[in-house]
Amino acid sequence: MAVESTMAAKCTAEFVGTFLLIFTVGCNVLSGNAVWGGVSIASVLMVAIYALGNISGANFNPAVSLALGLSKAMGGPGLDFRTVGTYCGVQVLAGIVAALCYAVLFWDTFNLAPAEGFTFVGAGLCEILYTCMLCFVVLNVAVAKKNSPNDFYGLAIGYVIVAGAYGAGAVSGGCFNPAVAIGIDVASAGIGFGWCLAYILFEAIGAVLAVVLFKLVRPEDFDGEKTPFTDLISEFIGTFMLVLTVGLNVLGLSAAGAYSIAASLMCMIFALGDVSGAHFNPAVTVAIFCSGRCDDLIPARAAMYIGAQLLGGVAAAF
């Protein structure tokens, strides 16, 4: 039986992981790394998760910690709120220190705000939806009873950043993390401060939404029972995030659109594959149905899958 790490060790792990993440964010932005920046940030997050996950759980994000706390409070897996509060404090501190370090290293900084041409509404929606995706993937691959432990959790969580950075990043900057928002805002306080407060709110809403969706697709983790609608909700969510990522990358003239879209699909498959099969595409559902290799996919069920996918796609497009 593994010995649980001390709170000091957990806090150190959260500080180190959050510092590495936000320092990497700043270095990529200030060096103008538009093509590989999202991959770089996602990769450092993935590596830190695999390195430190068995110590603290590798949250590195107050929104993730909040989602885990809410899940636990609702009777599911997660963290107690005392640990959540401690983690959030450490993560914010690490974010500020990391931001000051990249500012000193480059002797430059950048401000936190919606991208030129976009309002707080568009930026807010992007932060809500992709913070939700990030927290939702964490809940499904790191703590869901049926889907963990596994070997892909770090890859799935880290590459949500690839999914969101290239599309949503062109609108909001792609924080998806209150520690990132606070760190950037503090380091650039000399040229403007305050947007971090709005971003924190957006990201908290995303975390709450993620927990609600997690409970809907995995009621058995909350002492409930799976229903026929559970699979349809899963197909809706996965298709929604895939189509949303497609649209944002196309309209934002992304430098790595195909990679971002593929990352979105991969992350949602890892998160929901054991719930509905993670088709997220009417063509996939038709192909599986015609193959006859899935006894549960009767004609009526296949039709409902396709309906949920189409509805998710239309909702994402609007």
Image (cartoon, grey):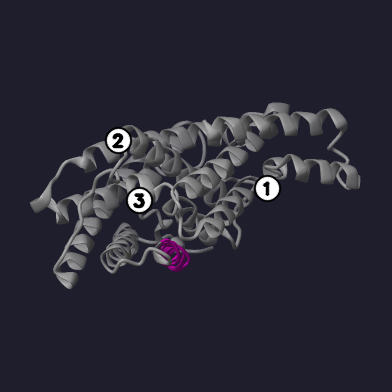
Q: Residue at x 12, y 47 (%)?
A: 192
83 over 23 or under it: above or below: above
Asked whether disc 2 touches disc 3, contact meaning CB atoms under 8 Å apart, the reply is no
> Which image quadrant is residue 57 in?
bottom left
1 or 2: tag closer to the N-terminus: 2
Residue 251: % across, % down? 47, 45
What's under tag 1, amino acid-wise?
Gly
What's the magenta bit mostly, secondary-structure-wise?
helix
Task: Locate residue 106 relative to residue 11 in the image: left or right.
Answer: left
**Which residue lies most toward the bottom here?**
105
Residue 161 belongs to the span the image colors magenta = no
Q: CA distance from mark 2 to mark 3?
A: 25 Å
- In depth, the one of 299 and 6 nearer the eye is 299
Label number found at residue 55: none
Q: Residue at x 62, y 29 (%)?
A: 224
Residue 127: % across, % down? 38, 41
Query: How many residues crowd around disc 1 within 10 Å: few (fewer than 14), some, or many (20 or more)?
Result: some
Label number found at residue 61: 3
